[in-house]
Image (tube, helix red, strand yellow):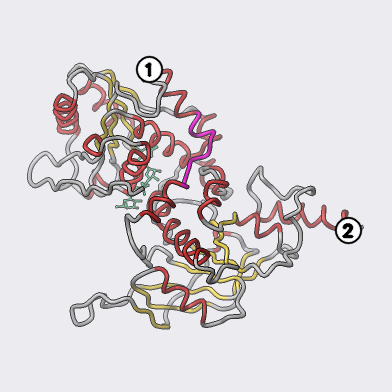
Amino acid sequence: MYSLLKVVFLLVTMTVAHNSEDFCNIDNKSCGPDISNDKYVFYDVNPPEGFNLRRDVYMRFAIMLAEAHKVGKNDNWRLVLPPWKNLYHWKTKSSRSPAVPWGHFFNINSLKSFAPVVELHEVFDKTEGKSLKIDRVYVLQNFADAFENGDFTDKWEISRGCSYGGFWGYNNVTSNVIECVNFQGKISKLWELIALHPSDRYVMFAHAEIPLHDTYGTKTFWDCRRSMKFNENLVTRAEDFISKYLNCDTKICNNYASVHWRRQDFARYRKNDVPSIKGTAKQIHKQIKQFNSYINTVFIATDADMTSLRQLELELTQLGYLVYYFKPSTADLDKYKDGGIAIIDQIICSHAAYFIGTHESTFTFRIQEEREILGHESRTTFNRLCPDKGRCEKPSKWTIVH
Ligand code: GFB
């Protein structure tokens, strides 16, 4: 009888909130009602924020939880990985719905080796009934004046005037308690909010992009970053491409350069930071010649429309380059989704002998980190495209700490 009930329960929860091949298997001992003392931190990010800022927000929370566990404080709290749903930049139909679990993009065991994380479907596996009631949602907001008396101090205060209706579009995830909090400063201060209601078991933070890293660029930061290994299918697809078209079978290649050419909103609204198409080709040529004049192969990762990409390709071809880009088939898009295609582009850029990025793009930042992890010399990584005219600030160098 218990087995029958369990099968019914599994079927219900799988259709409601599961989206993974890694569903709750009847043989899996971790499935079934949660009788542990585990408590769960959920978070959600401002809808327009992109994939690569969200990866950094994850790191802030993962480090917060990992650090607490390290010192034996709050060590019954787990971090729930918010499913990927309807990201503004992900236009392909198969990428918008249903929600995509983190395991699709990342190696979950590797994430778990750094921080106590669980997928949302793992929480559902342990939830009785088909709904999840979050005890309290703290909706974080910025203070109206971040620099009171000229100082930026870490602080929070309960406030008003907020709302939250997200829950990744799941109508079986709800909360009766929404609290507005003006917040600024280090993420570890969220423990003070959590401590206000010790009996809460499921606590959520909306606008989780507001709290900042306690410390940025430290060994702990890099340990966390290193644990964000990609899903093996994405790595294989990218490495097959590199092997087949770019003739390299190692993680650090010496025969091609790569460029992250961010367009779309950057080309429209950041004219002072990004070059024209002709200007882009000229700069790529100049930088490659300065680095290694034998390199004549360039890989372009971009969100540009096909017409612009073809124009850049033509310019570079006229300068004597072989130009490659990863053009996903419909099957690739269905399988890997827009986020996976972006990661494949990032992996291909990360293996290149020399990389040129786009100023202030978090997509570029994540490639730079990947290259630091692989062990490239920093001078081959922290390079940027400049505007055709005017000032061009040097990119900040966030080098790895071991
Ligand atoms: O990751 P992302 O937020 O970095 O970029 P930024 C936005 C999305 O655009 C990515 C697509 O998640 C991808 O879906 N994209 C950008 C790309 N570049 C590439 C590429 O080379 N290859 C592929 N396959 N996809 C932020 C925005 O962008 O910039 C914010 O998210 C805002 O909304 C801010 O506009 C200024 O940091 O570049």
Q: Which residue is mark 1?
A: 247
**Residue drawn at x 35%, y 45% as measured from the top left:** 366
User: Compared to 203, does 221 lie above or below?
Assistant: above
Tag 1: amino acid: Asn
Q: How many marks?
A: 2
- C-beta proximity under 8 Å, tags 2 and 1: no
Q: Quarter of the image holding residue 160?
A: bottom left
Q: Separation of disc 2 and disc 1 at Cα?
A: 57 Å
Q: Are there few (<14), some (14-19), or many (20+) residues within 10 Å of tag 1? A: few
Give the x, y percent position of residue 4: 88, 54
Give the x, y percent position of residue 29: 76, 53
Element class at badge 1: loop
Along the line of sight, the residue nearer the viewer: 289 or 250: 250
User: Compared to 355, does 159 lie above or below?
Assistant: below
Q: Which residue is mark 2?
A: 2
Stretch of the chain drawn in magenta: 227-236
Q: Is mark 1 within 8 Å of ligand 1?
A: no
Give the x, y percent position of residue 239: 45, 26
Q: Which of the two marks, 2 or 1, is nearer to us in this view? A: 1
Q: Main secondary structure of the magenta part?
A: helix
Q: Quarter of the image holding residue 135?
A: bottom right
Element class at badge 2: helix
User: Compared to 75, does 95 lie above or below?
Assistant: above
User: Compared to 58, does 148 lie above or below?
Assistant: below
Give the x, y percent position of residue 14: 71, 52
